[in-house]
């Protein structure tokens, strides 16, 4: 019975379990009247709650003494009610099952909860890993598309630069000489001799319009022009080379939509807008309108060098007035002959 001397619990009136208490303390409280008559007591070695009087049987001598209260009547049998709640920090008494069985049930329940938590954690980890893999795959695809789009945009921008250089070379080396010759033949002064050589800006502006029929003929016959051939560009249609109608429509559209009629502010705006459309759509609006396309061959350093030499030579001849002087001398020779 030595094990029954400690760790007793008493069901308090508020449903809380009071304890653990030594058996002698339990007896003294009962003798002092601080515990209800029908209080229930429980010990770890008992399977269920006992009346307090039964739990204290044999301890009356321990609490007797001068002025000790008379022995109380045994408490009534416990009523069928829920067991009191254990006090915070106290060891909880059982309901009906013995303490060893309750502990085993609790351990089994905790083990199941731990296993369920482990399974949920494993599932969450697997789902997170799958999400990360999908995000990486999507990121790789997105990066690949972005890189491909950047490369494509770079190629289209390069083609736009080649188109501008090709047109400048055609204007300077084809349009300007023809415009100068035409001016020397039709703008004659007294005695049937040609007037003074025209200014460089005037010749360049006239060359834009003179180039329309010339470019139409060259595209319909060869699919390219001197400037385009030098920069590896060729205009193609459904049947190969464009027909005269498509080539004529393309050449006319370029004059006002591609170079803004040669008016400098409009030319700058037109070139920028056309360049943006080419980069975004992959084709110029005048090609799309005529059902044509521009085929660009690979450019090596030699082609770029020859293109810039031709551009610099044409600018030198125009700015120095040599085209006008050559045209005047030619007109004088023709008129004198």
Image: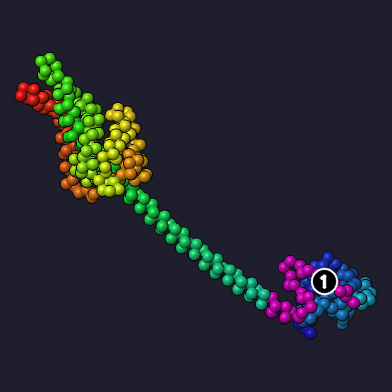
**Residue 225: horizontal and vertical position, in percent?**
21, 40
Stretch in magenta: 77-106
Q: Is residue 91 visible?
A: yes
Q: Looking at the image, which is closer to me, 311 or 230?
A: 230
Q: Is residue 316 above or below residue 123?
A: above
Q: Residue at x 50, y 62 (%)?
A: 131
Quadrant position of the N terminus in the picture: bottom right
- How far across and how far down the image is residue 215, in percent? 23, 37
Q: Residue at x 22, y 25 (%)?
A: 202
82 inside magenta stretch: yes
List the single residue furthest toward the left. Answer: 337
User: Which residue is under mark 1?
Assistant: 82
Residue at disc 1, secondary structure:
loop
Q: Main secondary structure of the magenta part?
A: loop
The answer to whether residue 1 is left or right of residue 196 is right
196 left or right, relative to 266: left
Q: Is residue 111 left or right of residue 24?
A: left
Q: Residue at x 33, y 34 (%)?
A: 257
């Amino acid at each position: 019975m030595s094990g029954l001397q400690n760790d007793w619990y008493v069901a308090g009136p508020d449903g809380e379990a009071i304890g653990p208490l030594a058996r002698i303390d339990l007896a003294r409280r009962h003798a002092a009247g601080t515990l209800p008559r029908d209080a229930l007591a429980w010990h770890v070695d008992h399977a269920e709650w006992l009346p307090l009087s039964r739990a204290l049987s044999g301890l009356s001598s321990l609490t007797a003494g001068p002025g000790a209260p008379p022995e109380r009547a045994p408490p009534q049998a416990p009523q069928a009610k829920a067991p009191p709640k254990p006090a915070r920090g106290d060891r909880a008494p059982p309901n009906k099952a013995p303490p060893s069985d309750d502990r085993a049930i609790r351990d089994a329940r905790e083990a199941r909860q731990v296993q369920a938590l482990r399974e949920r954690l494993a599932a969450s980890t697997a789902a997170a890993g799958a999400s990360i893999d999908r995000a990486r795959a999507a990121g790789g695809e997105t990066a690949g598309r972005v890189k491909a789009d950047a490369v494509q945009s770079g190629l289209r921008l390069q083609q736009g630069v080649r188109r501008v250089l090709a047109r400048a070379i055609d204007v300077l080396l084809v349009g300007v000489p023809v415009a100068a010759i035409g001016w020397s033949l039709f703008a004659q002064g007294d005695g049937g001799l040609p007037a003074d050589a025209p200014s460089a800006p005037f010749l360049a502006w006239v060359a834009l319009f003179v180039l329309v029929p010339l470019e139409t003929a060259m595209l319909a016959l060869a699919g390219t022009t001197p400037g385009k051939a030098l920069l590896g560009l060729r205009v193609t249609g459904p049947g190969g080379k464009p027909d005269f109608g498509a080539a004529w429509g393309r050449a006319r559209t370029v004059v006002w939509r591609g170079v803004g009629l040669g008016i400098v502010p409009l030319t700058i705006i037109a070139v920028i807008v056309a360049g943006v459309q080419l980069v975004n759509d992959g084709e110029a609006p005048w090609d799309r309108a005529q059902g044509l396309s521009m085929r660009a061959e690979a450019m090596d350093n030699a082609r770029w060098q020859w293109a810039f030499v031709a551009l610099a030579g044409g600018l030198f001849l125009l700015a120095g007035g040599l085209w006008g002087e050559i045209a005047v001398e030619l007109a004088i020779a023709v008129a004198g002959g």
